[in-house]
Amino acid sequence: MSDEFGLVEPQEGEAFGDEWEEIDLSDDEADRIAKRRDRDFDEFRIRMKDADQFKVEQSVFDDATFAAIYKLVQDGHIDAFGGPISTGKEANVYEALGPDETEVAVKIYRINASDFRHMRDYLEGDPRFEGIGHDKGQVVRAWVRKEFANLERAERAGVRVPKPISVQRNVLVMELVGVADDRARRLSEVNVENPQTAFEVVREYMRRLHRAGLVHGDLSEYNLIIHEGELVVIDLGQAVTIHHPNAEEFLRRDCHNVAKFFQRQGADADADSLFEFVTADEAEEEDEEDAE
Ligand SMILES: Nc1ncnc2c1ncn2[C@@H]1O[C@H](COP(=O)(O)OP(=O)(O)OP(=O)(O)O)[C@@H](O)[C@H]1O
């Protein structure tokens, strides 16, 4: 592993040790907040449930989710909610105001809507999640913490991702890419002006991610967003470590999807060479550079 991008050796259990206990609201604590007939919490929950952007969702967010949002507000990570950016199958993403008027994105997983078996396939075989139980809520919460840990690791590796800010249970707060009025678009929604350069950037990010011990696992034009010429990799919930038994298969699929998209845009991209590039041994690559 090189220090070039400040990469870290993937370590078993990394970012999933005791420190998580401190930042993640425990079941007991969430229950206490939700059950406690605390006037402040009740008012907060009613206010949230009455807010326009939550009206449609009010049946799907349980009290524990409101308790998690409440904790994020108390901890100063969220000041006010804006509208939804995306309402997906498993999670909704909202824009919100963070401290000092900064805009943040809040991704809320709906525990009941989550495809829990699909999540387990990705969690099983990841050394960070050994011993994860079968409890649905526990699996979804582990998934969200994994997304947060993956964002942190990707960021340290020099991959442009939304900066992770905080996580509580099924709620993840991160940097909002773009601004509320001028939101980042998915690559699938725009005309890529310089596809070859964009492909080379994505290729480099895939390599850095791999060298940091991660495979995205769902990379395509739908999980790459662009804002003011900057490409950002999103949706790292399913990203697995390279130790995962299906890591190679996931990486080959990512290479196939990315190469196919950029080929259509006119770039010189090919899935097999992309795979070679991403997995190239660093020492060999340095030797080649020295020989040139
Ligand atoms: N940090 C962010 N900044 C700006 N926009 C974001 C951010 N995160 C997500 N989005 C927007 O929300 C959409 C959904 O985000 P994401 O892919 O993480 O959620 P998802 O529930 O897995 O979505 P899907 O089910 O569509 O795959 C993205 O396509 C993007 O448009």
Image: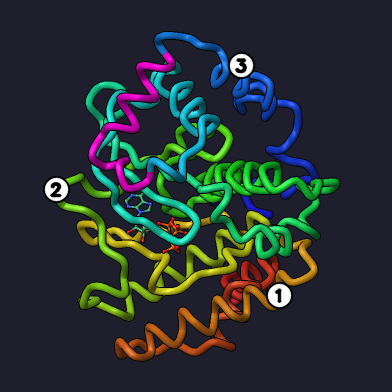
Disc 2 Cβ-to-ligand 1 distance below 8 Å: no
In this picture, residue 175 sits left or right of residue 111: left
The furthest residue to the right? 131
Q: Is residue 292 visible?
A: no
- Which amino acid does the dot numbered 3 rest on? Arg
Name the residue: 34% across, 87% down: 267
Dot 1, crowdedness within 10 Å: few (<14), some or many (≥20)?
some
Instruction: Name the residue that disc number 3 marks.
Output: 32
Magenta segment = 41-57
Q: Quarter for ligand 1?
A: bottom left
Indicate which label's residue lies in the foreground, 3 or 1. 3
**Residue 248's disc number:** 1
* Three-letter code for the amino acid on which mark 1 is drawn: Glu
The percent coordinates of residue 214 (x first, y second) are 64, 59
- According to the image, label 2 marks what residue? 181
The image quarter containing residue 21 is top right
- From this viewpoint, is residue 80 visible? yes
Q: CA distance from mark 3 to mark 1?
A: 43 Å
Q: Residue furthest top?
A: 39
Relative to 102, is 164 above or below?
A: below
Q: Which amino acid, mark 2?
A: Asp
Q: Is most of the magenta stretch helix, strand or loop? A: helix
| Residue 56 located within the stretch drawn in magenta | yes
* Rendered image: mark on residue 199: none
